[in-house]
Image (cartoon, grey):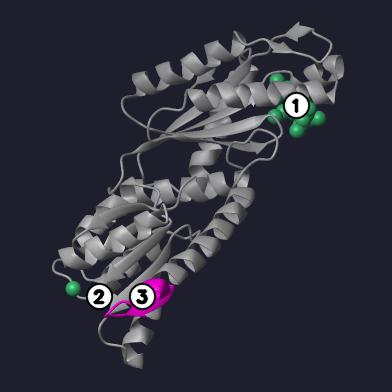
Amino acid sequence: METSVLVVDDSAVVRRIIKELLERYEYRVLLAKDGEEALAIYRREDVHVVITDLEMPKMNGLELCWLIRADDDQHRTFTILMTTDADSQRRIEAFDAGADEFLTKPIDLPMLRARVRAGERITRTHRVMADLLNTDYLTGVMNRRHFMERLERAHDGAARHSAPPLALAMFDIDHFKAINDTHGHSNGDLALKRFAENCAALVPEGGFLGRLGGEEFGMVLPAGDLEATVAGLERIRESTAALTTVTADGVGFQFTVSVGVCLAPGAESVAALLARADEALYFAKRSGRNRTVV
Ligand code: GH3
Ligand code: MG
Ligand code: MG
Ligand code: MG
Ligand code: MG
């Protein structure tokens, strides 16, 4: 994937010079004239490197660095702050705001290019490590650790009303032990991959899926009305029952899944939500499996 560089400066001339330089080296260049505009682009696009001016109207470069760093806990974006003033107090402020590098104006273009190249190297390493840390090796969906982190964050947002209320669903494949016993562990693995792949394709906009362990998966989804949420989960449950997993020997088999769901009004703790979804799942199992219980 090509490297995206966001160039932020209130001077159109500076933006143009940097854009021309970087495009010559085949970077994808995005432009913004102040911190506010930059932040909107940063949130919309996958930005590898940000080069930002310090003094700008609306939102300055320090605030921009600070907001990116607050959002980017896995360090997927490398930030370079530019200023005409090179005194050490300014540099300290820049690093404290979360900038990774510093450039003084007038800009030495070969130096800027070298900084971008170094930033690119660092951010790519961070991305590889973050992906390893966050991903379930077998199925490729979020692992438990990352899912819980994202759940905490989504829950905090919903509690502060800065994000929509959420629902938490827990899936547990039915009689999975029998699949392993009948078809062998590696075909059990295939079934897990098949389930995850199908489920991932059906995650609603704004939701996410993780493997909590074994044959258990969790999904966070925006809680519209209860009926729509349950209807969406029922579609996943039904499509799971319709999947065929084919073993290495060419034997096809099916399985079903039970689903427990709870709607989160926002006040409860994450632990309480998990317990409620788990309880619903337990009732789904007890009342015959292959069903969704709220
Ligand atoms: P229930 O319908 O009540 O959920 O029954 P179950 O058989 O699905 O549940 P149980 O908890 O008894 O068994 C889950 C099995 O999942 C046991 C374990 O060996 C197997 N398992 C856990 N992780 C993996 C894995 O990564 N791959 C495979 N193939 N099997 C796994
Ligand atoms: Mg300026
Ligand atoms: Mg289980
Ligand atoms: Mg069990
Ligand atoms: Mg099970």
- Residue 68, placed above or below residue 275: below
Q: Residue at x 28, y 49 (%)?
A: 162
Does the Cβ of the disc 2 residue fall within 8 Å of ligand 2? Answer: yes
Is disc 2 placed on a helix, strand or loop? loop
**Amino acid type, label 2:** Leu
Residue 294 x %, y %: 47, 24
Q: Which residue carries the number 1 mark?
A: 189
- Quadrant in which ligand 2 is drawn: bottom left
Q: Which residue carries the number 2 mark?
A: 54
Q: Nearer the viewer, residue 107 or 179?
A: 107
- Measure the C-alpha gap from mark 3 to mark 1: 45 Å
**Amino acid type, label 1:** Asp
User: Local crowd at mark 1 within 10 Å, few (<14), some, or many (≥20)?
Assistant: some
- Residue range highlighted in magenta: 98-111
Whether the magenta-drawn stretch holds residue 42 is answered as: no
Q: Residue at x 42, y 68 (%)?
A: 113
Q: Which residue carries the number 3 mark?
A: 97
In the displayed structure image, the side of residue 68 where residue 36 appears, left or right: left
Identify the mark nearer the N-term, 3 or 2: 2
Whether the magenta-drawn stretch holds residue 109 is answered as: yes
Residue 169 x %, y %: 50, 30
